[in-house]
Structure formats: structure tokens, C-alpha cells
Image: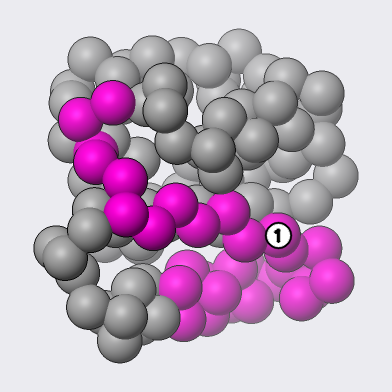
Amino acid sequence: MYIAIYTRAAQGTISDSQLDECMFNAEKLAKKMGFLKRKIKVFKDEGYSGMDIKNRPELTRLRSEIGNAHVSHVIVPDYARLSRNLADIQILVEEFEYHDVELVVCQ
């Protein structure tokens, strides 16, 4: 099992440096929690809206990995990286809980 870091940015809404900072903070938190670098996989959707969880390739891949019991934790910089839709956030949180995956939010 491994730790997943997930982030997302819609086209033109967040700069590359801000996205890199989000990733850096998530990786820093993973290390602080005692996870080794080799146990971390990054899932990054760039240019995708946060209003829909169905059409994001990396989120879809992450959900598949969770369903196959490959992920123990998901680290996100903030809830908005998962979704800007509260109903979708609830769906994802329930899905993570069902598969015993701990969601860690940096902020």
C-alpha cells in the first residue's frame, strides 16, 4: 500500500508555482507523518474543473487504486482540490471511508 497525493487545478486558475507549492506542502506533510518517499504516488489533474469528479483522469485512476486496496492515505492541499461541489466531496469522503483510506487535508 502507498500514500497518494492528489491535487487539481482548472486552466488558468492557479499558477504553476502555486501548484508546485501545494505539492511541496503535501509531500512535506507526508514525510512529517513518517511516510517514506518510495511509498508516495502523486496524482495531478491540471486544466480540469473542480465542479465535476467524473471527467478527471488522475482522480479516476486514484479512485481505481483505492478500490483495488492499493492506497492507505490520500493527502490533499485543501478540500477544493478534490472538488468545489460539496456533494462530490461527500461522495469521495464516503468512498475513502468505505475502503479504509484516511483523507489528510493540509489546511
How packed is label 1: few (under 14 Cα within 10 Å), some, or many (20 or more)?
some
What segment is highlighted magenta in the picture? 23-52
Residue 93 position in % (x across, y down): 42, 24
On screen, residue 82 above or below 18: above
Q: How does the figure colour the protein chain or chains?
A: one colour
Mark yes or no: residue 32 visible: yes
Q: Residue at x 24, y 39 (%)?
A: 50
Q: Is residue 25 magenta?
A: yes
Residue 13 position in % (x across, y down): 14, 63
Number of callouts: 1
* Quarter occupied by residue 107: bottom left
On screen, residue 42 above or below 38: above
* Quarter occupied by residue 40: bottom right
- Residue identified by numbered label 1: 41
**SS of the residue at dot 1?**
strand
On screen, residue 101 above or below 28: above
Q: Is residue 101 magenta?
A: no
On screen, residue 87 above or below 35: above
Query: On the rendered structure, is 92 left or right of 34?
Result: left
Query: On the rendered structure, is 37 left or right of 60?
Result: right
Amino acid type of the residue tagged 1 in the rendering: Lys
Q: Residue at x 56, y 43 (%)?
A: 58
Residue 92 position in % (x across, y down): 43, 23
Residue 68 position in % (x across, y down): 82, 23
Q: Residue at x 58, y 54 (%)?
A: 43
